[in-house]
Amino acid sequence: MPTLMEQPKTSTKELFRAQALKYMDELYASSVRMARNKEAAEDLLSETYTKAWKAFGRFEQGTNMRAWLYKILTNTYINQYRHKQRTPYMVELDKPQDPDSSAGGDLYDKILGASPTLFDNPDHVLANRILDQDLKKAIDALPDEFRMSVILSDVQQFSYQEVADILSIPIGTVRSRLWRGRRLLQAALWQQAVASGLVKEKAGGAA
Amino acid sequence: MTCEEWISRLYEILDHDMDETLWKELEHHMRNCQPCLDRFEFEKAIQQRLSKSCAQETCTESVRIRIRAIFEETQD
């Protein structure tokens, strides 16, 4: 006999709509940064939701839906899309023979060396002068393994542990990929800042 | 630790990956070292810009329709 306290059952569709759809815009943003073009990103997003809907019965209610969707997204990208993509251009570190050196290659040191006055208020300068499109271009230039970590950590602000879970890699690997990814990203931002005339590269380099 | 060593670890704070004792030590160091503080603010600004500029993009209506069709048309 049904009790009077029984709640009307929420349908699976309603649950999915309420829990999964709210991440559509941010998943789309991440898809664009992964696939590097809007059309492929739309396919990637659509495939992600198709898989999520099919697997929704296995999603453990109360756990992290956002991380769960990102795991599906990154797996889909890694398995199906990345082989079709080519890195549009590669950025080189200043000292490729010494990638672990923390000196010399940083954007900060370079800008400081080139245009000290830009640094009267470093915060302010950066916040206003680097264009959105330049940031996106710099992310797009990263090789896959570093790009994924930067998107998840710096852009979408997942913790190291969450990034490790999403990408199924050890937490130490997340740290090292982020470290290297950020250096590559800064190298790309520097190249763009020089190319756009924001800063002038000193003769003989800024190292 | 030297300034160079602190700088190499700045992202541990930005990523909330530094233990509290060390964090306090670095905080103390930065109160007395303007170059390290500037550097910290710089890296923080880049990280914030990345998240502000690239975290959200609005899907087109056609994508929304396509995604809704994935589950709305199936039997519950």
Image: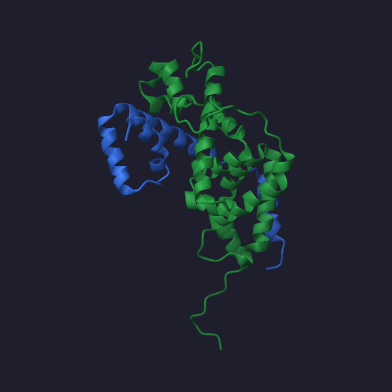
Could you tell me which quadrant the N terminus of chain B lies in? top left
Q: Is residue A16 left or right of residue A126?
A: right
As drawn, the residue found furthest toward the right would be A84
Residue lying at 47% horizontally and 17% vertically, measured from the top left: A206
Where is residue A203 drawn, in percent x and y?
51, 10
Q: Nearer the viewer, residue A82 or A133?
A: A82
Chain A colour is green
What is the quadrant of the C terminus of chain B in the image?
Answer: bottom right
Residue B72 at x, y percent in the picture = 68, 60
Residue A92, picture quadrant: top right
Position of A60 relative to A190 (above/below): below
Q: Residue at x 65, y 49 (%)?
A: B64
* Numbered label tally: 0
Q: Is residue A49 above or below residue A135?
A: below
The chain coloured blue is B
Question: In the picture provided, is B61 more to the left or to the right than A62?
Answer: right
Quadrant hosting residue B34: top left
Residue B19 x/y as whole percent: 35, 48
Residue placed at 54% from the left, 54% from the top? A165
The image shows residue A65 at horizontal and vertical percentages of: 54, 58
